[in-house]
Image: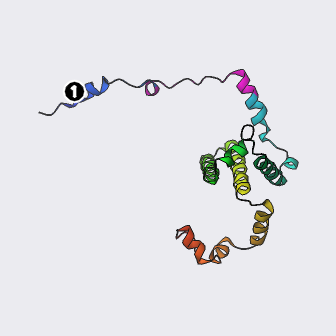
Amino acid sequence: MPKSPKKKAAKAASLPMPEAVAAPAKTKKPPKSVRSVEKRILAPLDIPAADGDATVLDRLWQTVEQRRLSGDVNHSHSARLMARGTAKVAQKLGEEAVECVIEATQGHRAETILESADLLYHLVVVWVDGGIRPEEVWAELHRRQGISGIVEKAARPKGIVRAARTTKLP
């Protein structure tokens, strides 16, 4: 014999509720030392236009290349990351790209700026790991300047499309 709706409701009401669901957790302020560091590091998001130019990428590439050459995995995140191999370097780039996309999709401007910086840093690490100099990328961008993206993709050799294993590229 099937249970009545009243018995089902009573049984459901008597089930224990996880604390996280039952009452929303109160957000606790981080310690003052953490807030101080966050303020010092995260505050410079209002960058004057004079400080915001692309030469920072060339300087970043030089720094990452120096760290690669030093091989000091104990003191350099870049050296440690590259020592783990190209697959790990590429994985980190992918993770940062996803985080940037999530923040942009949610309309979080400040977080998108932070994640964009992380993404560019990890892209530079990929370049250094692959022996790619920034000038090579700048030259390719210069070559493409004034060319429609649709035309540029259509001009790619069919081998690239096959290697990519996608039909997204024309």
Where, quadrant-wise, is the N terminus in this rendering? top left
Boundaries of the magenta span: 20-36
Q: Position of residue 148 (x, y in %)?
A: 69, 73
The residue depicted at 63 percent of the width and 53 percent of the height is: 90
Q: Position of residue 102 (x, y in %)?
A: 59, 47
Q: Which residue is mark 1?
A: 7
Note whether residue 53 is visible. no
Q: Residues within 10 Å of mark 1 (few under 14, many from 20)?
A: few
Note whether residue 51 is visible. yes
Q: Position of residue 26 (x, y in %)?
A: 55, 23
Query: Given the current orientation, which residue lies at the most extreme left position?
Result: 1
The residue depicted at 84 percent of the width and 54 percent of the height is: 55
The residue depicted at 78 percent of the width and 51 percent of the height is: 65
Q: Which quadrant of the view contains residue 141? A: bottom right
State left or right for residue 121 relative to residue 96.
right
State left or right for residue 51 relative to residue 153.
right
Identify residue type, mark 1: Lys
Q: Position of residue 93 (x, y in %)?
A: 64, 51
